[in-house]
Image (cartoon, rainbow, N blue to C red):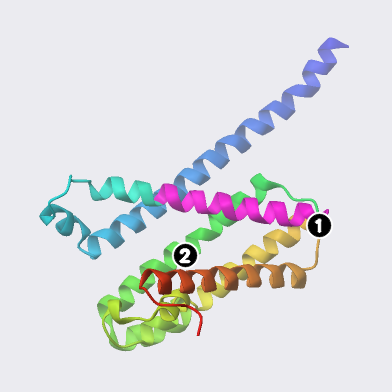
Amino acid sequence: MPHAQTWNNAPTTSRRFPAALQATLGFTAIALVWWLTTRQQFMAAGLDEALAGADVPQVPVTLLAFSSVAGRFTGLVLEAAFYLAWWRSWGAPFRFGRFFAWIAGLSLIDAWALGLRSIARDQGGDVAVWLAPLVGIDLLRDGAPGSASSIQLAFGTLGLTTLARIGFTAYAQARETRRGLAVTLVVTSVVWLACRVVTWWTLDLARGASPMP
């Protein structure tokens, strides 16, 4: 009956709207956290003063932070799309939207790590030593930031937060694909390692050096 059909569809519609609203609020909150984190990083680096003294059209740091957040979300979309293509090519089920929501939330681990790294650099000494295993082994390195080698820049953020990000990303894939956690952990680790190696080689090429011996 028409009335019965309308009645049965009503709960479905009412359930979908809160889910969509929750997703919108969640992504907005994540973007806001990243915008605040990025803006603080730019301000701490003196980017606003550098831009003010440069003979170039002035771009507000706030706008640059928005651009950085947009770029980060683009990267998350590409990450989710890669895993979608990978697992679908092996015949595994994979929901893009659900996985994207997972890794967007997990990116807050990276934002938290950036904040801790800023504290470690400001405080130095024992604080940097204690936080290095958590947010990045490059905090143990002496010398100016510009003196770091390409491989140090590529792998310098390796720490417990990075391992947590890899582990939870693998767990999200295991839930989506119904594959074993060990399998998805290997895939995620290899992808992370490959991205780090590409970053290392790219930095070497940008510096005019060859990444190959």
Q: At label 2, which amino acid type do we have?
A: Asp
Q: Is residue 189 above or below residue 46?
A: below
Q: Position of residue 94 (x, y in %)?
A: 74, 50
Q: Which mark is residue 90?
A: 1
Q: Position of residue 76 (x, y in %)?
A: 54, 53
Where does the magenta region start and end? Answer: 69-91
Quarter of the image with the N terminus in it:
top right
- Callout 1 crowding tier (Cα within 10 Å): few <14, some 14–19, many ≥20: few
| Residue at disc 1, secondary structure | loop
Q: At label 1, which amino acid type do we have?
A: Trp
The residue at 47%/65% (across/down) is 110
- Residue 53: say if magenta: no
| Residue at disc 2, secondary structure | helix
Q: CA distance from mark 2 to mark 1?
A: 30 Å
Q: Is residue 126 visible?
A: yes
The residue at 52%/39% (across/down) is 24
- Residue 80: say if magenta: yes
- Callout 2 crowding tier (Cα within 10 Å): few <14, some 14–19, many ≥20: some
- Residue 5 lies left or right of residue 78; in this view the side is right
Question: Considering depth in this image, is 141 or 127 the residue closer to the camera?
Answer: 141
- Residue 19 lies left or right of residue 125; in this view the side is right
Residue at mark 2:
110
Question: Considering depth in this image, is 7 or 40 the residue closer to the camera?
Answer: 40
Q: Which mark is residue 12?
A: none
Q: Is residue 77 above or below residue 194?
A: above
